[in-house]
Amino acid sequence: MERIFNDALRKYCSNDYYPWHMPGHKRQVELDSHVMGAGFDVTEVAGLDNLLEPEGVLAKSMQQLSAIYGSRKSYYLINGSTGGILAAISAVCRRGDTIIMGRNCHISVYHAVALLELRPIYIYPNIIKEYGICNSVLPEQLEALLKEYPECKAVILTSPTYEGILSDIQNLSRLTHQAGAFLIVDEAHGAHLEFGTNAPKPALRCGADLVVESLHKTLPCYTQCGILHIGRLPDWADKAAFTKRVEYFLRVYQSSSPSYLLVANMEDGIAAMEQWRSSRIPEYYNRLRRYREKWKGLKTLRLLTKETVQTYGGYAYDEGKLLFGMQAAGIRGSFFMEQMQQTYGMVLEMASLTSALAMTSIADTEEAFARFDQALTDMDRILCERNTAGKEEKETETTNDFEKIWQPNSQILCPGQALNQTGTVQPLEEAVERTVCDFITPYPPGIPILVPGEQIRKTHITYIRACLENGLSVHGIQGKDSIVVR
């Protein structure tokens, strides 16, 4: 990939132009010690095109994106996957439509559902009990719902999930198209799949119609960098009208003052991944496989593998995610995460009650893996000794917290209706059997365990209590332990 936009940006900034325009740092390089990157932070000026109406260097750069990823058209996103998700769902659905979605979708999907007052029909993936996570969405699950709800306009699924679980997008796409609906895939955690050695195929290559990727999650890109791809689309689709709606809603949900630093960084990051296809990327996968094989021997920290995923009926797994189950250790994931940071300086991506997640990328060096390996080895030894000595204070039922709440729930109101209700704030224990009026979302990973309009069960309260008592963040809780209900 050529650095078309980067070259134009550097050329522009090398001129003796003085900016009597935004942004307020006025590109003064001497401010870099206080405002990093100010020298190249330019907005829509002559020669640098307009991100929301690209005709020049940005249009050419995005044409290269399409060629690399095999899309009909690809777009830079400067406010992460969230803007892309909102635009994709808005482009496909009209107000009040029915949408089939994985119940494990990110909160941004639910926000789109609420904004458009859509009727959501949920697919509940099976769970991998030891880790407390969702497995793949199965084609037979989707096929049954498409037959039951023929009015469905779109299907949206997450693949890979936060923990690296992928679904069979090729078959799911075929089923969706046969039903006359569009398939949207939240591939926020899969931007690297296009470049991977022996990695699962990305959703775009498997027939998805709209795919959203967060470049900053697994590529060498800044936070907020993302891409929205339009796929090849089914034969029955009006491709021109479809593209026009996508572009309109991108203008709706993205800032009208886009950061060109982010755009330049995305072009750089993808160009680098292209250059590393035969060098750094294979080295990364070889290193990852070597260490994963070693970590299978840990006694108390159970590393999730593709074999386990498939044993539970899953389709595929991205082994760049390192998910450790805590069942044999007898501790909460939050405790493990805390110890790894405080004792070894290893800051993990997230922890749940039952597991802890470390994310890898091509930027991780041999030295980084070796340091992580030493920390894991030490922690495993300490936990073994602790258990052998009988001093462990095992948490109650560390493997089934998530299983108890991962059940179809009574939907009293659609999310959009419930959010518009005037609710009252109640202590958690007094909210049982009431209708929740807000999203209750452990974060990360940002998957709601309660959606506005759903009925609160005692198992939900128990799970929320366990999360709060173990230091996990739960969005939607009022004060220390209250919830908005109707």
Image (cartoon, grey):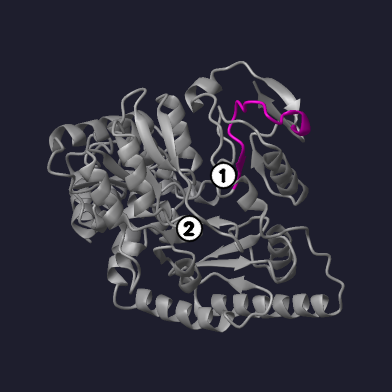
Residue 25 visible within the image? no
Q: Residue at x 37, y 62 (%)?
A: 192
**Between residues 427 and 379, which one lies in front from this camera angle?**
427
Amino acid type at mark 1: Gln
Q: Residue at x 50, y 50 (%)?
A: 36
Q: CA gap, disc 2 to disc 1?
A: 14 Å
Taking the magenta stretch, the answer to whether it contains residue 440 is yes
Residue 170 against residue 25 in the figure, above or below: below
* Residue placed under numbered mark 2 in the picture: 135
Q: Position of residue 84 (x, y in %)?
A: 36, 40
* Residue placed under numbered mark 1 in the picture: 407
Q: Position of residue 146 (x, y in %)?
A: 32, 40
Look at the image and give the residue range highlighted in magenta.
428-443
Horizontal side of residue 222 vs 379, given as left or right: left
Residue 184 against residue 298 in the figure, above or below: above
Taking the magenta stretch, the answer to whether it contains residue 222 is no
Q: Residues within 10 Å of mark 2 (few under 14, many from 20)?
A: many
Residue 225 visible within the image? yes
Position of the C terminus, as image quadrant, is top right
**Between residues 379 and 175, which one lies in front from this camera angle?**
175
